Image (spheres, coloured by chain):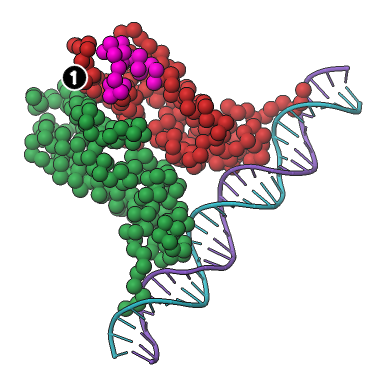
Chain colours: A green, B red, C cyan, D purple
DNA sequence: CGTGTTATAGAGAGATGTCTCTATTATTGG
DNA sequence: CCAATAATAGAGACATCTCTCTATAACACG
């Protein structure tokens, strides 16, 4: 019923991802996306009501794509294995999805879009909930109890540090494996060598 | 000789820094800078020939400001002390200069400006030379000889990791001291616990 | 006190981006 | 084959940004 769609939302998001990854936060203009698809700009607005919504949807899609494997990795019952797998997932997922990784790392959410669409407010609010819960759960498993500092430090070790390696590799042109993988694993693990993080249950090798 | 200047280049760069730090790479428009100074946009062009040159000059100024203390820290004769001081300088300088730090971390140089002014080409080329030399020298002091991987890893440990903490703190609203300082020091130091980095001269605690 | 000099003031030209609105095209079901 | 439907096509209104150009203001020096 009706004319078949020539362009899809996914196509638009794909084009927006590539443009953003390679040209910065402002590169994904509606005109540029339309050109990438060989469409006039009006056709884009048939699928997305605004540019902001394209960018916001791209952000959500990218975060979700990253999170699925990350949560699996962190769910491993052995605490140490979970840590290593989570860290490695950041590196390997980024290596396999360089454009998505660029969207996530080169550009922080705040600078990607100053005014986030209200329609997606709720979704954006809860976007990180799954990872946050998983981190809290991980801290509980490691220590028996949680504190705000322990959760923050764990977040830093299991997300912040591996992402710094992704940024580093992307700007330096280094491959995301070899010595860098090993270095990130050591750096991340070292964060846990702290009395504050290991009071109730000692993590011994 | 002539009317006294009401606005200075420094004032313009200060306004651009604040705008960029708080509103992202595109926030420092000439109009916005002019408004911040209470001047019409034409007056800005009397001091800077183009917006690109404002942003590029701001970048150089910010990097230089950061580097001066960093190089001092890294110049300490004791290798271990040099490392710790360098790492701490990143954290403390960022805490004391939050807007400058935001310019440096929230936005990578590439996304700040796609086309860098040719006039500053040479300056931008050599901007990191001093730090790179210092890192190479540090590696030589630690190991007796240098390899590309060792230099990269050192760069990651002494710049990448501390900056990831700055980003982390800025987006999470954590203070840049306390447990985070300690965690970063451990994470950074752990990168050096590697045979590749310690072949000729062992770094033992 | 006037002249030369240097800076600011402010309007506006031209480019680019977002978004709207109408016309047109392709398909499906009767 | 003929509606009904749902999509694309494309022009253009409106906003904003960069940069230019001319007029005007303030100060130094003789």
Q: Residue at x 34, y 59 (%)?
A: A11
In the image, residue B24 sits, relative to residue A39, either above or below, namely above
Q: Horizontally, is A120 left or right of A92 in the view?
A: right
Q: Horizontally, is B51 left or right of A4 in the view?
A: right
Q: Report the front residue among B74 and B39.
A: B74
What chain does badge 1 belong to? B
Q: Is residue A71 visible?
A: yes
Q: Quadrant of the C terminus of chain A?
A: top left
Q: Report the front residue among B84 and B91.
A: B84
Q: Which residue is mark 1?
A: B195
10 Å neighbourhood of mark 1: few (<14), some, or many (≥20)? Answer: few
Q: Residue at x 51, y 39 (%)?
A: B115
At which x and y percent is residue B75? 38, 11
Q: Which residues are magenta?
A: B132-151
At which x and y percent is residue C29? 28, 85
In the image, residue B180 sits, relative to residue A132, either above or below, namely above
Q: Residue at x 22, y 40 (%)?
A: A92
Which element is circle 1 on?
Answer: helix
- Does the magenta run of residues contain A92? no
Secondary structure mostly taken by the magenta-highlighted segment of the chain: helix
Q: Residue at x 26, y 13 (%)?
A: B143
Q: Quadrant of the N terminus of chain A?
A: bottom left
At which x and y percent is residue A13? 35, 55
């Amino acid at each position: 019923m009706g004319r078949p769609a020539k362009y899809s939302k996914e196509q638009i998001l794909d084009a927006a991802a590539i443009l953003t990854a390679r040209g910065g936060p402002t590169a994904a203009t509606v005109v540029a996306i339309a050109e990438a698809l060989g469409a006039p700009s009006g056709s884009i607005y048939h699928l997305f009501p605004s540019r902001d919504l394209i960018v916001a949807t791209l952000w959500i899609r990218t975060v979700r794509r990253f999170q699925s494997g990350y949560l699996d990795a962190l769910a491993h019952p052995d605490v140490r294995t979970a840590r290593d797998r989570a860290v490695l997932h950041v590196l390997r997922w980024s290596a396999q999805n360089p454009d998505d990784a660029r969207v996530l790392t080169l550009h922080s959410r705040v600078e990607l879009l100053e005014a986030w669409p209200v329609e997606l407010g709720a979704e954006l609010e809860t976007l990180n909930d799954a990872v946050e819960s998983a981190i809290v759960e991980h801290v509980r498993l490691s220590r028996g109890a949680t504190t705000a500092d322990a959760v923050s430090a764990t977040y830093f070790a299991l997300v912040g540090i591996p992402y710094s390696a992704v940024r580093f590799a992307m700007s330096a042109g280094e491959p995301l494996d070899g010595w860098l993988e090993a270095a990130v694993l050591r750096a991340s693990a070292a964060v846990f060598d702290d009395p504050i993080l290991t009071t109730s249950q000692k993590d011994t090798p």
